[in-house]
């Protein structure tokens, strides 16, 4: 009988640095990453030197070799990085850690992401691809993710009839949740409909508040086996299912690919089908979701790609009331990338784990399942479902 | 040999592919021709150019001229100058154009001239924007 990885691993520790506006961290990026890793270890009462696996994504500059040397790690047994220069790998990184411990290759794996965008520049300003000659997108002024994704979102609105106003609901929801979160960068800075509507265009259909922040911040999660998780100090958030990938010709603008049949999607439909098939639950069974908001339009599309509503239902379903705590599907309950902190989506995983533990500031009552998605339009993308109940094997 | 360009001259010049995969394309635009890569085996087109056909995995590929016309598959108007040198050009329009001869092929470009007619499926014609070292394909909405 095939070994079932469903629920075989769990997140048992979470940690983070302080959150800063971009360029405002007094400490280096590596220092922030260490804050997060040490915080995650302390959260679950593990000696950081006993971490034996290291996973990151997004070409993280804080290499596992520097981390494990700095921490005096006794023995490293696992060290991997998800392909892709965007935030698509956040859930895939946790998936790798889960696979490593479930297979027995390592026992205590840390997933981490640190960035000091003031120290090293940022996605929104510098672009982050490798301009191969035929990929002359930079020459046409397609410089940053907002430029690459906007035509896809515009095409989506055109094809489906979904209203661009759904983007406003996502932005207002994130800011509303952040007002209860003293750690959020946008705490104390509520966003009104009027302010949203009067904000300047960045690139249509994205106004200022449709775009994620850029921050100096770091986050980390400790992953171990479900068996061992039961003996540790924190309630486990089991990895019920995880999936990564992209569809046919789902390359991206970074590879000069504009001809994919799923151009007007987030390229997460295929992985979402695998995700729910592995989980053995339906999208309607999701109690709370953390959707990676590089841009609000991407959240709207990812909700549809993950089956949480159809395009036909979107205009009625995607409202601030429905997405806020006590609504039909609370999302981004800590404020998310838009209003809490942008750690290339790893902060969303911390919030997913807090919801499963029951310790979130905006806690969804009796949350048993939490969906967390990673960078839409940034393939290979990834998604994960955490759950509270241990899966019987 | 230069013409008025949509974006400031010399901002992000074309860097030819170091593997030479796109050389025939750039030779074509110099001659005001759009040449798209086609597989010598299965005769199907692909873009961006690669060293292998993604339809049949044959390695022998050629570049074939296509009509310089198409329709707008999608677009986005850029307002914020990410690079301050772009400020004089903002707002500018990014367009993704489906070629009339090969609708499954989509080319990225900018829109030249009046953008009030820019819409999904609007017919467009190529405008060849000559720079010192390369020629870009841009697009104008047909009147």
Image: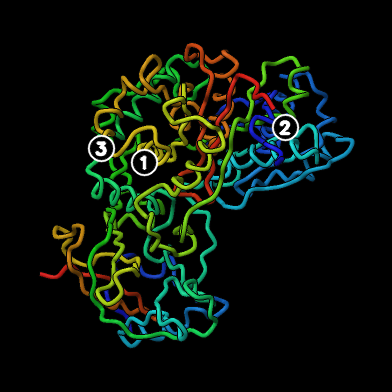
Query: Which quadrant: the N terminus of chain A?
Result: top right
The disc numbered 1 marks a residue on which chain?
Answer: A
Q: Residue A312 carries which label?
A: 3
Q: Which of marks 1 and 2 is in front?
A: 1
The disc numbered 3 marks a residue on which chain?
Answer: A
- Residue visible at 47% across and 72% down? B55
Q: In which quarter of the image is residue A242?
A: top right
Q: Let me know if residue A334 appears in the view.
A: yes
Q: Which mark is residue B6?
A: none
Secondary structure of residue under mark 2:
helix
Same chain, marks 2 and 3?
yes
Secondary structure of residue under mark 1:
helix
Going from N to C along the chain, the mark reached first, 2 or 3, is 2
Going from N to C along the chain, the mark reached first, 1 or 3, is 1
**Which residue is disc 1 drawn over?**
A301
**Which residue is disc 2 drawn over?**
A34
């Amino acid at each position: 009988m095939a070994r079932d990885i469903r629920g075989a691993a769990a997140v048992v520790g979470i940690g983070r640095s302080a959150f800063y506006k971009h360029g405002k961290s007094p400490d280096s990026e590596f220092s922030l990453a260490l804050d997060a890793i040490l915080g995650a270890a302390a959260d679950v009462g593990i000696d950081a030197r006993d971490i034996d696996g290291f996973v990151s994504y997004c070409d993280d500059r804080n290499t596992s070799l520097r981390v494990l040397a700095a921490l005096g790690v006794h023995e490293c047994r696992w060290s991997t990085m998800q392909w892709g220069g965007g935030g698509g790998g956040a859930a895939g990184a946790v998936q790798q850690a889960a696979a490593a411990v479930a297979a027995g290759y390592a026992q205590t794996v840390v997933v981490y992401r640190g960035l000091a965008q003031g120290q090293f520049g940022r996605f929104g300003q510098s672009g982050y691809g490798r301009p191969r000659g035929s990929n002359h997108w930079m020459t046409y002024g397609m410089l940053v993710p907002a430029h690459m994704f906007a035509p896809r979102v515009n095409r989506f609105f055109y094809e489906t009839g979904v209203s661009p106003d759904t983007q406003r609901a996502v932005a207002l929801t994130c800011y509303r949740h952040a007002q209860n979160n003293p750690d959020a960068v946008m705490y104390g800075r509520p966003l009104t409909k009027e302010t949203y509507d009067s904000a300047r265009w960045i690139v249509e259909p994205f106004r200022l508040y449709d775009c994620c922040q850029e921050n100096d911040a770091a986050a980390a999660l400790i992953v171990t086996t479900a068996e061992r998780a039961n003996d540790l100090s924190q309630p486990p958030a089991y990895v019920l299912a995880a999936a990564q990938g992209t569809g046919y010709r789902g390359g991206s603008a970074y590879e000069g690919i504009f001809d994919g049949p799923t151009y007007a999607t987030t390229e997460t439909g295929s992985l979402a089908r695998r995700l729910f098939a592995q989980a053995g639950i339906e999208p309607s069974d999701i109690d709370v979701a953390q959707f990676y908001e590089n841009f609000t339009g991407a959240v709207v599309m990812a909700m549809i790609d993950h089956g949480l509503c159809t395009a036909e239902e979107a205009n009625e379903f995607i409202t601030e009331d429905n997405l806020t705590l006590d609504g039909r599907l609370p999302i981004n309950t800590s404020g998310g990338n838009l209003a809490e902190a942008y750690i290339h989506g790893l902060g969303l995983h911390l919030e997913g784990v807090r919801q499963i533990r029951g310790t979130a500031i905006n806690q969804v009552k009796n949350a048993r399942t939490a969906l967390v998605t990673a960078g839409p339009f940034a393939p290979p993308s990834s998604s994960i479902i955490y759950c509270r109940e241990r899966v019987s094997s | 040999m230069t013409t008025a360009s949509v974006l400031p001259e010399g901002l992000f010049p074309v860097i030819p592919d170091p593997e030479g995969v796109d050389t025939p394309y750039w030779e074509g635009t110099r001659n005001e021709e759009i040449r798209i890569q086609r597989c010598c085996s299965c005769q199907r087109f692909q873009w961006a150019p690669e060293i292998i056909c993604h339809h049949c995995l044959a390695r022998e590929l050629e570049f074939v001229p296509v009509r310089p016309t198409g329709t707008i598959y999608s677009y986005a108007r850029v307002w914020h100058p990410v690079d301050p040198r772009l400020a004089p050009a903002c707002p500018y329009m990014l367009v993704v154009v489906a070629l009339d001869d090969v609708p499954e092929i989509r080319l990225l470009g900018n829109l030249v001239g009046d953008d009030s007619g820019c819409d999904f499926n609007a017919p467009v014609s190529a405008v060849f924007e000559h720079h010192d070292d390369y020629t870009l394909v841009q697009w104008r909405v047909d009147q």
